[in-house]
Amino acid sequence: MPSVQDQLDEVGAKVSVAVAAVEHDAAASPVLAAVVREFGGKSVKARKVAARGMKEAREAVVELEQAGDSAKAAAEADSGAGEATRQAVLDAHLSICMLKSKL
């Protein structure tokens, strides 16, 4: 089984795809862009914090999931965002939820 750090790296890759999708989607709202950027920032932070130990990793995963929940809600509420953008955010959200369920 991959380590939490490895799994966070995989989640981080999906979050990066979501951030890039929002950045390139001219129709995405500024709110969605801000929330997804925050999700990206939390992803970077989670990977750094998780290296300190298992307790810290769990806390980082919970915090990242909360940011993912916000990003998912924003993506679902943004009627202007493209389908590819919405799907990238949903995929990133699902990946952190799956990781959390394994801890």
Image (spheres, rainbow, N blue to C red):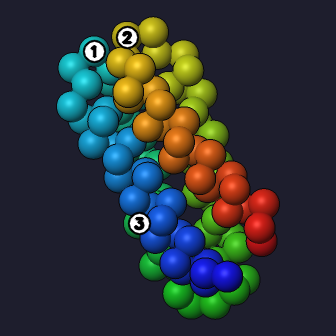
Residue 100 in sight here: yes
Residue that sits furthest to the front in the current view: 1
Q: Amino acid at mark 3?
A: Val
Instruction: Pinpoint residue 17: horizontal percent, then vertical percent.
Output: 35, 47
Which quadrant, please, contains the C terminus? Answer: bottom right
Of residues 91 and 53, the one nearer the viewer is 91
Q: Secondary structure at mark 3?
A: helix
| Mark with earlier residue (1, 3) | 1
Instruction: Pinpoint residue 49: horizontal percent, then vertical percent.
Output: 53, 79
Q: Secondary structure at mark 1?
A: loop
| Mark with earlier residue (2, 1) | 1
Location of mark 2 (residue): 80
- Name the residue: 27% across, 42% down: 20
Q: Which mark is residue 44?
A: 3
Q: Amino acid at mark 2?
A: Gly
Residue that sits furthest to the top in the current view: 79
Instruction: Pinpoint residue 98: horizontal percent, then vertical percent.
Output: 69, 56
Q: Are marks 2 and 3 in contact (CB under 8 Å)?
A: no
Q: Are marks 2 and 1 in contact (CB under 8 Å)?
A: yes
Q: Label 1 to label 3, Cα distance in Å?
A: 26 Å
Q: Are marks 1 and 3 in contact (CB under 8 Å)?
A: no
Q: Residues within 10 Å of mark 2 (few under 14, many from 20)?
A: some
Q: Secondary structure at mark 2?
A: loop
Q: Residues within 10 Å of mark 3 (few under 14, many from 20)?
A: some
| Mark with earlier residue (2, 3) | 3
Location of mark 1 (residue): 27
- Name the residue: 61% across, 55% down: 96
Q: Is 66 placed above or below 41 here?
A: above
Of residues 91 and 45, the one nearer the viewer is 91
